[in-house]
Amino acid sequence: MPVKYVFVTGGVVSGLGKGITAASLGRLLKARGYHVTMQKFDPYINIDPGTMNPVQHGEVFVTEDGVETDLDLGHYERFIDENLTKNSNVTTGKVYWTVLTKERRGDFGGGTVQVIPHITDEIKSRFHRSGERTLPDGEPASWGVGQNGSGKEGSQESDDMEIAIIEVGGTVGDIESQPFLEAIRQFQHDVGRENAILIHVTLVPYLKVSEELKTKPTQASVKDLQGMGIQPDIIVCRSELPLDDGIRSKIAQFCNVPKNHVLQNLDVEVLYELPLVMEQEHLAEVACESLRIPCPEPDLTEWSSMIESWKHPQKQVTVALVGKYISLHDAYISVVEALKHGGVANHASVSIRWVDSETVNDRNAAEIFDGVNGILVPGGFGSRGIEGKISAIRWARTHGIPFLGLCLGMQMAIVEFARDVVGYRDAHTAELDPDTSHPVIHLMPDQNGVEDIGGTLRLGSYPCILDKTSKAYGLYGQETIHERHRHRYEVNNDYRQALTEHGMKLSGISPDGRIVEMIEIPDHPWFVATQAHPEFKSRPNRPHPLFSGFIEAALKNQLYYQYD
């Protein structure tokens, strides 16, 4: 299958939404029947973001095949509704690691290893090639991925054309991004400009004092690209105000692009609305024109319907998200989006109350969670704020508030239950209290002896067998499910009997019977927790069943208190 390439770069400042722009194009092209895949090339030296502080970098996203990646890959998956792979996120660290490994083996025959051609050749070799997509394994058709924009399996054009959209992180002009830009220049020369185009996302600032939109930053950014031998094909302008015809003409003239290839990207009410907005700007049309491929009418019916439901909710519900990285909301971006997806499934707007777990204790829980309809405790690492998470879980359990625990959230639900229900007062996770006499959470056996912390967790998609009498089974509608994981510790099986004898249901178990994957408390209105990270698989047009069920329960809780 032939492949066309679309590179996306950013200029002037960071944070302009290159990833969302790229993902929106992916959605629009997929709605036209094309196979679409996406990649992110990051200029940082880290091998991956797995060891990076969430407050600095944001969420670490995990792919089906078990790789820790940049959070933009979550946006890609949610927009294009495809599972991405280990090849979808490439860092400078990965590139140099590979080249230096080859040098140590003697692969370069004693030659001098240089940025050009060795680093740039390695970058080019990692640009997507046809056939690298992975399809989901074991997902129910009702909410799984791998479908086109119309919700139907396959597409008419998919066997004829595949489009790889490749975002380059950082900002044009940064020294870190230069090898990637040089690789793009060479790649365009190798495959032909009609097979590899470039979209440049830039800023057109508004100066309030003079009441003018300024094009100079965009001109300067494009000149930086041109100075490297790269001519953008399309310029996407972020701006507070609409671009008039004169502004578009000016940018087109000074940046050497057709005027209809200068597009505006204004803020939208709902993130997922952007593909519809960019369709009005003809983004897919000018991309197809530049790639010299047909541009059939898109089928955006399902997407438009989802946006309509999102913008016109019939109800509202409040969920407390209890974490320790809340100073940067991007640290929990997939969780937040999954909650919103669950809201759409229930025709409800989800209001999130951000709760710093370090501030929570048993004495102030009533005040903190007043008016909350559901409590969610997400994943995390380290001891900071852990007792606050336990207090939040205790409040949810003892006051009948719907609760959803994810990864560490499930582990702390086990700790809280073991302490307050079973009676093991010092119960804890061995990760945080190695000396506890009741290590209800302990290190996974296959993690013994692991010293490196990067890329060594239990990562990626794993199967789980659900108890047919559980809430989870009712939500998923099937016995065997697959969810993504990112953890090193698990439920200590020595305590299974004590937990179940005191009323906890171990509702999901690994096929070999070794790992507790999900738990519930049957006599609670809705208390469900999972060792997995289901938020990574939720899509706006295909909400995850756990989040849909959680929001439904929170709405019922809201009604209970209204009429009690």
Image (cartoon, grey):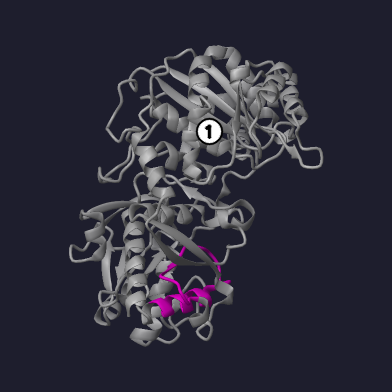
Residue 238 is a magenta residue: no
Give percent across and percent down for residue 289: 50, 15
Say which quadrant the C terminus sits in. bottom left
Taking 331 as reference, is 276 above or below it? above
Q: Amino acid at mark 1?
A: Ala
Q: Residue at x 43, y 43 (%)?
A: 78
Q: Position of residue 193 (x, y in %)?
A: 57, 13
* Up/down of 106 relative to 556, above or below: above
Task: State whether residue 522 appears in this view.
Answer: yes
The residue at 58%/38% (across/down) is 94
Q: Nearer the viewer, residue 253 or 315?
A: 315
Mark 1 surroundings: few (<14), some (14-19) or many (≥20) residues within 10 A:
many
Residue 384 located within the stretch drawn in magenta: yes
**In the rendered view of the protein, which quadrant contains the N terminus?**
top left
Q: Residue at x 61, y 58 (%)?
A: 328
- In front: 370, or 294? 370
Residue 266 left/right relative to 468: right
Mark 1 sits on what residue?
22
Nearest to the observer: residue 270 or residue 137: 270
Q: Is residue 405 above or below residue 208?
A: below
Please name the residue shown 74% across and 25% down the image: 219
Relative side of 186 to 476, left or right: right
* Residue 357 position in % (x across, y down): 55, 72
Tell me where the magenta segment starts and ends, as one range: 369-396
Q: Secondary structure at mark 1?
A: helix
Residue 320, x across and y down, in percent: 47, 68
Q: Residue furthest right?
A: 209
Q: Is residue 107 visible?
A: no
Residue 158 against residue 443 in the figure, above or below: above
Q: How many marks?
A: 1
